[in-house]
Image (cartoon, rainbow, N blue to C red):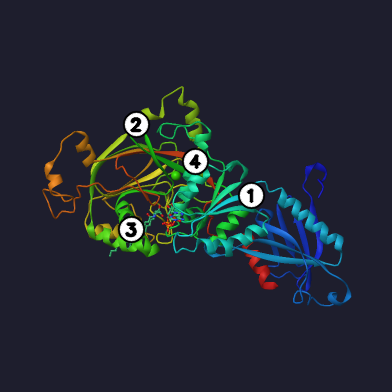
Amino acid sequence: MERLPGGRRPRLVSSLGLGRRSWEVTLDEERGRLAWRDPRPPRRAGENCFVPISEIISVEETELNKKQRNIGKWQKMTKLHAFTVYYVKKARNHRWRCSDVTFWCVDEHLCNQWIQALKELLEMQKSRPKQLLVYINPYGGKRQGKRIYEQKVAPLFSLASISTDVVITEHANHAKDNLFEVNIYKYDGVVCVGGDGMFSEVMHGLIGRIQKDSGIDQNNPKASLVQCNIRIGIIPAGSTDCICYSTVGISDPVTSALHIIVGDCQPLDVSSVHHNNMFLKYSVSLLGYGFYGDILKDSEKKRWMGPMRYDYSGFKTFLSHHYYEGTIAYQPAKHTLGSPRDKDSCRTGCYICKKSEQQLAEQHKDCGLKHEEGEEEWKVIKGKFLAINAVNMSCACPRSPKGLSPAAHLADGSADLILVRKCSRFDFLRYLVRHTNQDDQFDFPFVDVYRVKSFQFTSKLSEDNESNVMDIGKKRFGQFCRDHPACCCNIVNSTWNCDGETLDSSAIEVRVHCQLMKLFARGIEENCKDEAAYSQNSAEQLL
Ligand SMILES: CCCCCCCCCCCCC/C=C/[C@@H](O)[C@H](CO)NC(=O)CCCCCCCCCCCCCCC
Ligand SMILES: Nc1ncnc2c1ncn2[C@@H]1O[C@H](COP(=O)(O)OP(=O)(O)OP(=O)(O)O)[C@@H](O)[C@H]1O
Ligand SMILES: [Ca+2]
């Protein structure tokens, strides 16, 4: 299509067959959509349908089959030419499906003109990936990764003309190590088929590789890390799939594949975790000490149980009711407009994330002139905690649809630090139940929440060890409190759960890096059924 005078984008309007009827079909570049309507008056509701061009998957010339050829008088008179448009159809609960519509006409030239125009527009969608590197963990979740990819995802990638290099992992860290060896720069993205652990591997491989290639030392906790612009796509096939659920709104392989195909982009905050100037791990979802750390540690021995291991270990850990003593120091996230007690959540195109990014960029510019980040105020809290949870995102997942911090933002450069102090088993259960319902999880006297940009934790045990006060009683009585053998106070440390992986140190230093990486996702869309989806559904009812 050629440009119109005045720089206006052109429209292609034709009368094309759809089913047994003739429709007015418009390719409107100005409004970025393909629309079709029944031109016969009086108009019945739902007869205007459109698909945003950004949500068209592909277009193909089509041979009308026998069933489709039953389109009235035309079939007897002449040869028909047809093309099929494959597009994203939005269903309930953020689920996406691939739908299609076939238009026909008698004029071969007109049919080709339409195919050509649509293909040109798809070619102009520059954010769409053409070449992807795919890692499949065949043992994640219910061990369905390979089947899910082959049956549900690969056919969609091939429909969208995406070429792939597929690696089926043979051992843990295979994907991570591989990302340090391959030419990552020839790919438009990396896809991981598996759970949060698999995502974590790919993220470590990509971020680590970029820092290495840029000469950044990951062991320096104050280093300004280089942003990773190679997007990661997650095809959920794990046990929790929290990162996928929190960034797409559903854990569904087809939906995720379609977000990859249309080239969505969602920036994501990443926390770096250090111990004594030594890099340990990155985290994007939950960094949990106490309850979630203990569940993870126990559940690792029960991997053979599959996703059920978390319920088993969760129940056991709940009954053990251990709490841990320690000190937390944190720097409040003053740059962001939001608060963890907000009623509104992070949604597609989030204003708070955009504003926070700008604020941080300005602060960094001024940094040299004013004060270093490290000099900003630190707040210190000492106490006995059942759980310390730091989340970079809501951590919503099928078990907890609102997540551990429903108002946390995906890309605001902050994490929500949730401190659950020692309380009764009954109160802790009330808190856990609120992970699963609409009630306010922070509305308890024993729960505090802060929005932070960095924090440090030291357990009482390591503080004591550091000050060289060796309590022989602790050794003799093993893991139980010497003074109160039945009090659930645990003298050994808990373990940090870092996105589903255990950390070896309990004393850690954490810093949030605003939008360090990007996903093939768009955040969670507002729940209203939008116009496009409505029209598409009604179009299908008419056919
Ligand atoms: C009474 C019902 C309470 C139900 C509470 C359900 C809470 C579910 C919260 C899930 C939060 C997930 C946060 C994401 C963490 C991921 O980075 C990580 C890697 O995949 N997953 C886990 O660590 C895996 C963590 C899995 C945690 C499962 C916890 C299950 C707890 C069960 C407690 C039972 C108490 C029953 C008392 C009668
Ligand atoms: N071929 C393999 N054999 C054994 N382990 C693997 C293999 N490939 C990857 N892994 C490891 O398996 C771990 C768990 O995988 P994954 O995250 O896919 O599933 P999951 O643990 O069931 O799900 P979730 O992390 O959502 O709870 C990852 O940390 C990854 O390092
Ligand atoms: Ca965040």
Ligand 3 resides in the quarter of the picture at top left
| Circles 3 and 1 in contact, beta carbons < 8 Å | no
Residue at coordinates 68% horizontally, 62% vertically from top-left?
A: 86
Q: Distance between the residues labelled 2 and 4?
A: 29 Å
Q: Distance between the residues labelled 3 and 2?
A: 38 Å
- Label 3 sits on a secondary structure element that is helix
| Circles 3 and 2 in contact, beta carbons < 8 Å | no
Residue topped by disc 3 = 299
**Amino acid type, label 3:** Ser
User: Which comes sooner in the sequence, label 3 or label 1?
Assistant: 1
Q: Distance between the residues labelled 3 and 1?
A: 37 Å
Position of residue 120 relative to residue 184, above or below, is: below
- Label 2 sits on a secondary structure element that is loop
**Amino acid type, label 4:** Ile
**Amino acid type, label 1:** Gln
Q: Residues within 10 Å of mark 1 (few under 14, many from 20)?
A: some
User: Which comes sooner in the sequence, label 1 or label 2?
Assistant: 1
| Circles 4 and 1 in contact, beta carbons < 8 Å | no
In this rendering, which labeled residue sits more in front, label 1 or label 2? Answer: 1
Quadrant in the rendering for residue 53: bottom right
Position of residue 191 relative to residue 372, above or below, is: below
Quadrant in the rendering for residue 436: bottom left
User: Which comes sooner in the sequence, label 3 or label 4?
Assistant: 4
Q: In this view, does 483 lie to the left or right of 125?
A: left
Residue at coordinates 78% horizontally, 72% vertically from top-left?
A: 21
Q: Which quarter of the image is occupied by the C terminus?
A: bottom right
Dot label at residue 207: 4
Q: Is residue 18 left or right of residue 139?
A: right
